[in-house]
Amino acid sequence: MKSILITGATRGIGYATAKQAAMQGWIVILNGRDEACLAEVKEELEKYGATIHTLSYDVCDIDAIKKAFMWIKKNVGKLDAIVNNAGILDDALLGMVNEKQMTQTLAINTEAVIYHMQYASRLMMKQRSGAIVNVSSIIGRVGNAGQTVYGASKAAVIGATYSAAKELAPYNIRVNAVAPGFIATDMTQQLSEEKFEQRLSEIKMGRIGQPEEVANAILFLASDVASYITGQVIGVDGGMVI
Ligand code: NAD
């Protein structure tokens, strides 16, 4: 059975990916910060007959990442795929960006992704196989007013994906990203009605996306069906960038 680690797996796109992975028979390792929440999701996903593990840590805690991968090596034995999904949105117009927003956004959305790729690749290089899927954003491709820091954090994920893909291809490790558009999760619930309507008007398909629709693309890239695909960014955006 194949194993997959998903960061930020207790809600939204991460949860949808974990649920579909469980239904497809993956061994699913859930990351989150809230132990009670992780336990609840584990119990729910075990109903699909899947083996579910939980690892509670903040993705910015490098020491915790190291321990998490040691735990995976010891207890699961191998890691076939990792989904770097955990992320935050903390918008501000450029003139209002503060140090906390900058530091926190880049730490969670970018640096944590690179550290997770580093530790995952060390395991995967020994296996000489693996798939890394990073969750970027349409904002990292085309930008948006009020999202300079978020856009930078997500564009950096795309750059890191391309570079890691080139470095890891000789080890049979594939590195890809998805760039979701406007998806119905807690993250987009925080938008004002005006901003919500404005984003909606940019979508050619005329509707918001569902987390499951992003999960489908993530699990496609994580699976052997995508065995010859690396260094790609798949937009899951209902036609926002066409
Ligand atoms: P969400 O807010 O529902 O989920 C984010 C998850 O990340 C949560 O489970 C949260 O607890 C976790 N998380 C945040 N900081 C963490 C940390 N320091 N350590 C561990 N976990 C942490 O939002 P979502 O929409 O499901 O977002 C998932 C990913 O998709 C994010 O990277 C986001 O930037 C990206 N994305 C979302 C949209 C959208 O429209 N919803 C669009 C493009 C990209």
Image: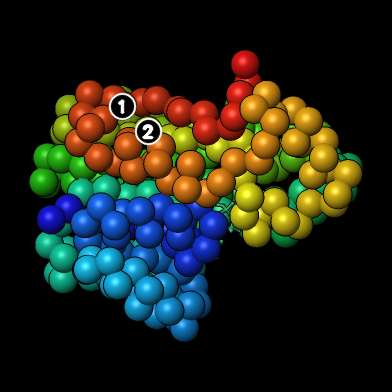
Residue 177: x and y, percent? Answer: 43, 35
Which residue lies at the image location 13% right of the left edge and 56% below the top edge? 1
Residue extending farthest top = 242
Q: Are marks 2 and 1 in contact (CB under 8 Å)?
A: yes
Residue pictured at 29% horizontal, 72% vertical: 46
Q: Residues within 10 Å of mark 2 (few under 14, many from 20)?
A: many
Q: Secondary structure at mark 2?
A: strand
Q: Secondary structure at mark 1?
A: loop
The crowd level at tag 1 (other Cα within 10 Å; few <14, some 14-19, many 20+) is: many
* Apparent side of residue 99 relative to residue 118 in the rendered image (left or right): right
Q: Position of residue 113 (x, y in %)?
A: 45, 48
Question: Would you place residue 85 above or below residue 233 in this image?
Answer: below
Residue at point 45%, 55% (across, down): 16
Is the residue marked 2 within 8 Å of ligand 1, measured from its CB?
no
In three-dimensional space, the C-alpha distance between marks 2 and 1, rounded to whole angstroms, equals 6 Å
Snapshot colouring: rainbow
Q: Is residue 152 visible?
A: no
Instruction: Say what amino acid the circle numbered 2 marks.
Output: Asn
Mark 1: amino acid: Thr
Q: Residue furthest bottom?
A: 36
Pick whichever of labels 2 and 1 is earlier in the sequence. 2
Residue 187 in the image: above or below residue 150: below
Give the residue number, with chain letter if any, for mark 1.
230
Residue identified by numbered label 2: 176
